[in-house]
Amino acid sequence: MTRGGRRNFWLRTTDSMGLTEPGKKPEMPGPRLLLFQVVLWFAMTLVWIGMLTQTQGEDVQVLYGALVALSLVLTVANFVLLRRARRGTDNSGADGQADRPTR
């Protein structure tokens, strides 16, 4: 682990998967990355739904149905993480008390 400096992309990736240090809580990805992932997984969900409605074979429809479900789960998971990340940046000023004028 690097001491005090910014971590490179590979170490941040392994941190987010929980692989770098046992018992260490992984760093939260930034809101921009999470927003990109939400949009990407939602678009993939729409693509898989389109493929599901266009195909005729039962085996292929099962595969596309599973891909739709997986994409929806990943969209919701990334959306929840995005909400947490935004809530963390919004409440960084001691529950909003720092912005209020005192009388």
Image (cartoon, rainbow, N blue to C red):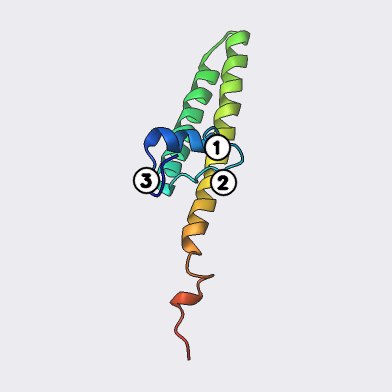
- Asked if marks 1 and 2 touch (Cβ < 8 Å), the reply is no
Secondary structure state at the residue bearing disc 3: loop
Residue 57 lies, with reference to residue 31, above or below; the image says above
The span from disc 1 to disc 2 (Cα, nearest Å) is: 25 Å
Callout 3 amino acid: Arg
In the picture of the structure, the residue carrying the numbered disc 3 is 6
- Asked if marks 3 and 1 touch (Cβ < 8 Å), the reply is no
Residue neighbourhood size for the residue with mark 1, other residues' Cα within 10 Å, grouped as few (<14), some (14–19), many (≥20): few
Q: Residue at x 43, y 35 (%)?
A: 11
Residue 21 tag number: 1
Residue 24's spot in the image, x, y percent? Answer: 57, 43
Residue neighbourhood size for the residue with mark 3, other residues' Cα within 10 Å, grouped as few (<14), some (14–19), many (≥20): few
Q: Tell me how many marks there are.
A: 3
65 displayed left or right of 20: right
Q: Residue at x 51, y 64 (%)?
A: 91
In the picture of the structure, the residue carrying the numbered disc 2 is 80
Out of 44 and 52, give the one closest to the viewer. Answer: 44
Out of 88 and 23, give the one closest to the viewer. Answer: 23
The span from disc 3 to disc 2 (Cα, nearest Å) is: 26 Å
Marks 1 and 2, the one that precedes in the sequence:
1
